[in-house]
Amino acid sequence: MADQSVTTQNKYDGVAKTLHWIVALLMLVMLTFGWTLEDMPLEEKVQTLVIHSSLGLSVFILMFIRLYWRSNHTPPALPEGMPGWQVAASKFSHHGLYFFTILQPIFGVGQSMFADYEVTPFGLLSVHAGANESLYQIFHVLHGLNGRILVALVLLHLGAALYHHFVQKDSVLKRMLPYGRV
Ligand code: HEM
């Protein structure tokens, strides 16, 4: 008889799935439209940044909720027999996604603090600390560079999910889909 004390969970729970897809959607929006900010006329940029900074800070908060949930709810194991390099690549990209996603809003806030325009997340509070061209430039470069790293990691993540689904034909993608049956 199977040991009842050992429960092998083979899919993500509803909370983990919901958080994953909300963050995925927000990141898709941010990493697609963020690049248009640089060349925008000032007034339009300031208005757009209300939405951009609000969504960015929401991602920041959601990532900590995800980390908290994950620490209490063990995610399903990787499929058996996966080559060692794929297991390592999976760990590297997942840790990277958490790390660089959390870093991105921090650089965004830094950039906004020293810009020569106001950024007011949720239209409520200005994060402005006084214009400083050199500090603005440092955070601007970091925010842009980190954004490029995130685009690469998201593409890798998406490629891996499709590879598992269509080539390996395992349950890795299905177990994260909203109505995926595993
Ligand atoms: C997950 C969160 C975020 C993502 C994915 C993201 C993404 C991006 C991207 C891709 C750019 C264009 C970078 C470039 O042109 O080199 C950008 C610009 C910018 N972001 Fe974010 N961002 C995030 C959060 C934030 C937050 C929280 C703030 C402020 C509170 C912020 C403020 C800005 C500002 C001020 C700009 C540049 C505007 C300019 O060119 O002068 N971002 N963001």
Image: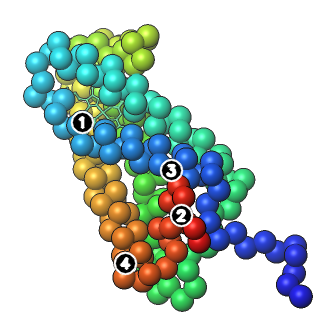
Tag shown at residue 20: 3
- Secondary structure beneath dot 1 equals helix
> Ligand 1: does it lie within 8 Å of the C-beta at label 1?
yes
> Nearer the N terminus, badge 1 or badge 4?
1
**Residue type indicated by callout 3:** His
**Residue type indicated by callout 1:** Gly
Q: Which residue is mark 2?
A: 180
Q: How far from the left and from the top, in percent, is residue 144?
A: 24, 41
- Secondary structure beneath dot 3 equals helix
Q: How far from the left and from the top, in percent, is residue 51?
A: 34, 24
- Secondary structure beneath dot 4 equals helix
Q: Residue at 52% of width from left, 74% of height from top?
A: 171
Residue 182 visible in the picture: yes
Give the CA separation, mark 3 to mark 4: 21 Å
Task: Looking at the picture, tell me which residue is in the foreground, 152 or 132.
Answer: 152
Answer left or right for 38 relative to 122.
left
Give the CA separation, mark 2 to mark 1: 31 Å
Give the CA separation, mark 3 to mark 1: 20 Å
Q: Are marks 2 and 3 in contact (CB under 8 Å)?
A: no
Q: Does 74 sit above or below residue 70?
A: below
Q: Say which quarter of the image contains residue 75.
A: bottom right
Ligand 1, image quadrant it occupies: top left
On the rendered image, what quadrant is the C terminus found in?
bottom right
Residue 112 visible in the picture: no
Label 3 CA crowd tier, 10 Å (few <14, some 14–19, many 20+): some
> Nearer the N terminus, badge 3 or badge 1?
3
Q: Which residue is mark 4?
A: 166
Q: How far from the left and from the top, in percent, is residue 119?
A: 32, 17
Q: Which residue is mark 1?
A: 34
